[in-house]
């Protein structure tokens, strides 16, 4: 065999081994991501945001369930959250991921819906999920379009409001829990430009805990809450980045929020408005993986700001 031919065979063997290695790594990463997407976790966080002298308030923050009727494991885990005995539940949108998902949401949240709560909607509560190019999320200048088969949004809203939950989609309302008066206001989903903060703008009630709620934490909405001196804003949408790098964090947020605020507690703007962004419970059925970003619900223990 000629030396140059042996060299060609060696190069081809190296290339084949490299491709096999990359393929195996890709399969391994995907398998890990599928497993982590089912590794539901409950986080606990204490925030000093209530008016002085207030009793503690336990708030369960749920977001981005992206439920389908077949997701039995997720449904059962959401059911189990009632054991946390929260005083108040806030859902920050994207409950649905299927035409027939409303009964699944009701099943999962049956006990939680017996607890006082409030909610806003996300784009996936209006339109069914679609296959998307994951690299588009790196384009911060892309135009977001509201598209897809319509979902039974009104049925979802009816179920939640019939349970007594506050509908905060460009609306506001008040409720007293444990002696704490909550003045809550919210917006419909900013991601598809359904937000209308002007319809609820203005000073919050005196001596109330001022709570802001939105699905996608776009800066324009957060700034509006900050201008009106919200004590805390709850949001979702980002999935915490969904696919993150260990020791680095989120690569994208799917909005104009910086990656270092993709999940958890942070402060916004010059006023350092307290904000909690949930990494969410689910994913799109067409991208059912998470890496270094477990699905979550968060129990926020709100205490007096002494």
Image (spheres, rainbow, N blue to C red):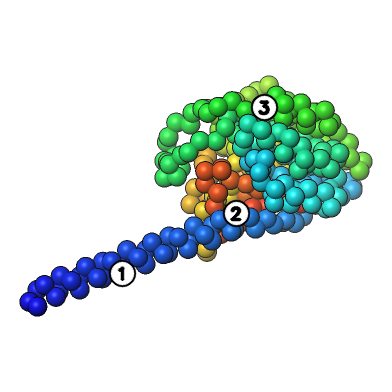
Mark 2 lies on residue: 37
Q: CA distance from mark 2 to mark 3?
A: 25 Å
Of the image marks 2 and 3, the number of the one nearer the N terminus = 2
**In the rendered image of this protein, does residue 183 appear above or below residue 237?**
above
* In the image: residue 99, left or right of residue 164: left
Q: Is residue 135 visible?
A: yes
Q: CA distance from mark 1 to mark 3?
A: 51 Å
Q: Is residue 204 left or right of residue 55?
A: left
- State the residue at coordinates (57%, 32%): 128
Q: Earlier in the sequence, mark 1 or mark 2?
A: 1
Task: Residue at 9% x, 78% y: name it.
Answer: 1
Looking at the image, which is closer to me, 214 or 287?
A: 287
What is the distance, in whole Å, between disc 1 and disc 2 at their CAs? 30 Å
Q: In the image, which disc is placed on residue 295?
A: none
Q: Closer to the camera, 231 or 184?
A: 184
Q: Residue furthest top?
A: 199
For mark 3, does the 10 Å Cα neighbourhood hold few (<14), some (14 to 19), or many (20 or more) residues? Answer: some
Residue in the foreground of this view, choosing between 166 and 64 = 64
Q: Secondary structure at mark 3?
A: helix
Vertical comparison of 218 with 74: above or below: above
Q: Are circles 1 and 3 on residues that touch, CB within 8 Å? A: no
Left or right relative to 145: residue 18: left
Q: Are marks 1 and 2 in contact (CB under 8 Å)?
A: no
Q: Which residue is mark 3?
A: 153
Is disc 1 placed on a helix, strand or loop?
helix
Front tag of 1 and 3: 1
Horizontal and vertical percent for residue 55? 89, 48
**Pointer 1 residue:** 17
Residue 12: quarter of image: bottom left
Q: Quick one: label 1, few (<14), some, or many (20+) residues within 10 Å? A: few
Figure check: 29 above or below 241 = below
Residue shown at 32%/63% (left/top)? 19
């Amino acid at each position: 065999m000629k030396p140059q031919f042996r060299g060609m065979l060696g190069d081809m063997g190296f290339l084949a081994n490299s491709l096999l290695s990359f393929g195996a790594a890709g399969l391994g990463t995907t398998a890990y991501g599928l497993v982590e997407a089912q590794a539901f976790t409950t986080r606990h966080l204490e925030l000093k945001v209530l008016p002085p002298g207030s009793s503690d308030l336990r708030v369960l923050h749920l977001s981005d369930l992206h439920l389908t009727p077949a997701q039995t494991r997720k449904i059962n885990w959401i059911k189990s959250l009632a054991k946390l005995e929260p005083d108040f539940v806030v859902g920050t949108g994207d409950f649905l991921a299927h035409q027939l998902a409303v009964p699944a949401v009701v099943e999962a949240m049956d006990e939680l819906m017996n607890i006082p709560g409030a909610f806003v909607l996300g784009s996936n509560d209006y339109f069914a999920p679609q296959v998307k190019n994951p690299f588009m999320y790196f384009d911060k200048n892309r135009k977001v379009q509201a598209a897809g088969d319509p979902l039974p949004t009104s049925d979802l809203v009816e179920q939640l409001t019939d349970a007594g939950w506050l509908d905060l989609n460009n609306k506001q309302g008040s409720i007293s829990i444990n002696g704490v008066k909550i003045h809550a206001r919210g917006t419909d989903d900013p991601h598809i430009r359904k937000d209308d903060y002007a319809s609820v703008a203005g000073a919050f009630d005196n001596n109330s805990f001022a709570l802001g709620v939105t699905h996608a934490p776009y800066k324009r909405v957060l700034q509006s809450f900050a201008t009106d001196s919200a004590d805390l804003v709850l949001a979702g949408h980002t999935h915490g980045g969904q696919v993150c790098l260990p020791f680095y964090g989120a690569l994208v947020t799917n909005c104009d929020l910086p990656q270092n605020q993709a999940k958890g507690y942070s402060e916004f703007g010059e006023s350092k408005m307290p904000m909690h962004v949930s990494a969410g419970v689910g994913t799109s059925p067409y991208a059912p993986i998470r890496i270094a970003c477990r699905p979550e619900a968060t129990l926020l223990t709100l205490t007096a700001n002494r």
